[in-house]
Amino acid sequence: MGRKDASTIKLPVDQYRKQIGKQDYKKTKPILRATKLKAEAKKTAIGIKEVGLLLAAILALLLAFYAFFYLRLSTDVDPDLEPDED
């Protein structure tokens, strides 16, 4: 008997959800479609953090490339020796 009484009482959360559902139902299809597209665009948008990380990675790669060739192509030249001397 107690269960029957408990099932008829609606929680405030359920009432709120029902009210929100009614409000969404009142919206027209173009408005709902626009809201969906806006939310989807927000999900898939690239943030500033990702762009910064990508630029930092490219910069690090270029610096490593430059350092490799700088160290590889630089030669130790002794200033006391002349190129013609043996």
Image (tube, grey):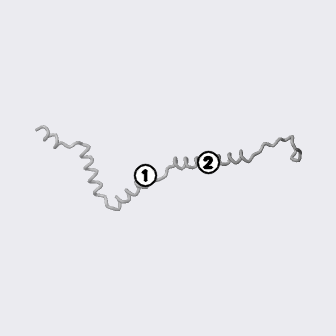
Mark 1 neighbour density, 10 Å: few (under 14) some (14–19) many (20 or more): few
**Amino acid type at image mark 2:** Leu
Give 80 or 19, whichever is nearer the viewer: 80
Residue position marked by numbered label 2 in the rendering:
61
Q: Where, quadrant-wise, is the C terminus in this rendering?
A: top right
Q: Position of residue 44 (x, y in %)?
A: 44, 53
Give 47 or 28, whichever is nearer the viewer: 47
Give 4 or 24, whichever is nearer the viewer: 4
Which residue lies at the image location 20% right of the left edge and 43% below the top edge? 10
Which residue lies at the image location 40% right of the left edge and 58% below the top edge? 37
In the image, taking residue 78 as reference, residue 69 lies left or right, namely left
What secondary structure is marked by label 1? helix
In the image, taking residue 52 as reference, residue 83 lies left or right, namely right
**Amino acid type at image mark 1:** Lys
Residue furthest out toward the right: 85
Total numbered labels: 2
Residue position marked by numbered label 1 in the rendering:
43
Q: CA distance from mark 1 to mark 2?
A: 29 Å
Q: Position of residue 49 (x, y in %)?
A: 52, 47
What secondary structure is marked by label 2? helix
